[in-house]
């Protein structure tokens, strides 16, 4: 009898945290369920507005995932916090950008990742065109991905296209070509490519 009581108390003790710490509902699922209810009630205006809001929340989550893939500063450099921004379709074609700036004395490097923008297709087409690419800079293979490096007068820019879905830009001022390439090479390009 005593053993059964101990077992019962042990089960209650082990299960209690799961009852007390119920998972917080996912806001994306909540807003989609709200939109569905509004749609069923033929409240089409609010249903559309809720779905737009839900889409924005999903893009924010994707932006947070992109921001986590921005590299830590190289030794001797400092960096701000990575940030992401969702741009409305009415502005510059819309899209999602994650960006982080790095500093060492007078030198700066800004790394940005852009995706989900209609403007990307025109950029990707330009990078794919050998005539344009040769005038834009030199080809350089960076962690297995094609990059175009344009460097002169202690400043430069590297553009890398990943899976025709992302454009990564490394923009540096008052730094060596090696430092610019070092930053490009420390970006988790495969991690970006594997994002949904």
Image: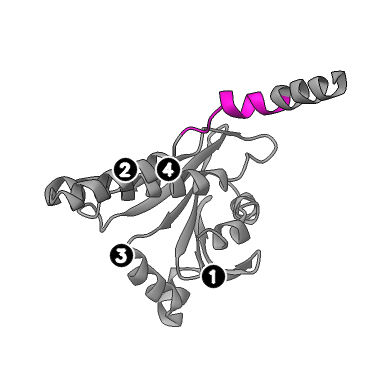
Work out how far the residue at label 3 is from the one at label 2, CA to CA, in angstroms: 26 Å
Residue labelled with disc 4: 84
Residue 144: give x, y in percent of width and height.
65, 69
Residue 40 vertical position relative to residue 143 in the rendered view, above or below: above
Residue 24 appears left or right of 145: left
| First of labels 4, 1 by sequence position | 4
> In the image, what residue occupies the spot 44% across and 73% down?
127
Label whose residue precedes the other's in the sequence (4 or 2):
2
* Majority SS type along the magenta span: helix
Image marks 4 and 3: residues in contact by CB distance under 8 Å: no
Residue 110 in sight in this render: no
The answer to whether mark 3 and mark 2 are in CB contact below 8 A is: no
- Disc 3 element: loop
Using a 10 Å C-alpha cutoff, classify the residue at mark 3 as few (fewer than 14 neighbours), some (14 to 19) or many (20 or more). few
Q: Is residue 54 magenta?
A: no
* Magenta stretch: includes residue 19: yes
**Visible residue check, residue 5:** yes
Residue 141 higher or lower than 88, as above or below: below
* Residue depicted at x 61% and y 45%: 71
The residue under label 3 is 118
Q: What range of the chain is rendered magenta?
A: 14-24
Q: Nearer the viewer, residue 22 or 160?
A: 22
| First of labels 4, 3 by sequence position | 4
Residue indicated by mark 2: 31
The first of marks 1 and 2 along the sequence is 2
Q: Is residue 152 above or below residue 136?
A: above
Q: Nearer the viewer, residue 142 or 76?
A: 142
Residue 18 pos. (x, y %): 62, 29
Foreground: disc 3 or disc 2? 2
Q: Residue at x 74, y 27 (%)?
A: 11
**Label 1: which residue?**
138
Real-space Cα separation, disc 4 to disc 1, in angstroms? 29 Å
């Amino acid at each position: 009898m005593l053993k059964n009581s101990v077992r019962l108390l042990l089960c209650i003790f082990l299960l209690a945290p799961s009852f007390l710490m119920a998972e917080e509902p996912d806001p994306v699922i909540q807003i989609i369920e709200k939109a569905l209810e509004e749609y069923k009630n033929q409240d089409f205006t609010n249903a559309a507005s809720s779905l737009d809001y839900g889409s924005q929340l999903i893009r924010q989550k994707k932006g947070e995932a992109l921001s986590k893939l921005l590299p830590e500063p190289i030794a001797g450099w400092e960096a701000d916090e990575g940030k992401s921004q969702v741009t409305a379709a009415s502005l510059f074609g819309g899209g999602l950008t994650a960006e982080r700036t790095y500093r060492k004395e007078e030198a700066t490097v800004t790394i940005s990742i852009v995706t989900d923008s209609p403007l990307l297709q025109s950029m990707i087409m330009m990078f794919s065109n050998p005539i344009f690419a040769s005038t834009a800079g030199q080809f350089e293979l960076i962690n297995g991905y094609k990059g175009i490096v344009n460097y002169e007068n202690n400043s430069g820019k590297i553009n890398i296209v990943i899976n025709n879905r992302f454009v990564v830009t490394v923009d540096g001022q008052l730094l060596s070509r090696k430092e610019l390439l070092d930053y490009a090479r420390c970006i988790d390009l495969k991690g970006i490519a594997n994002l949904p």
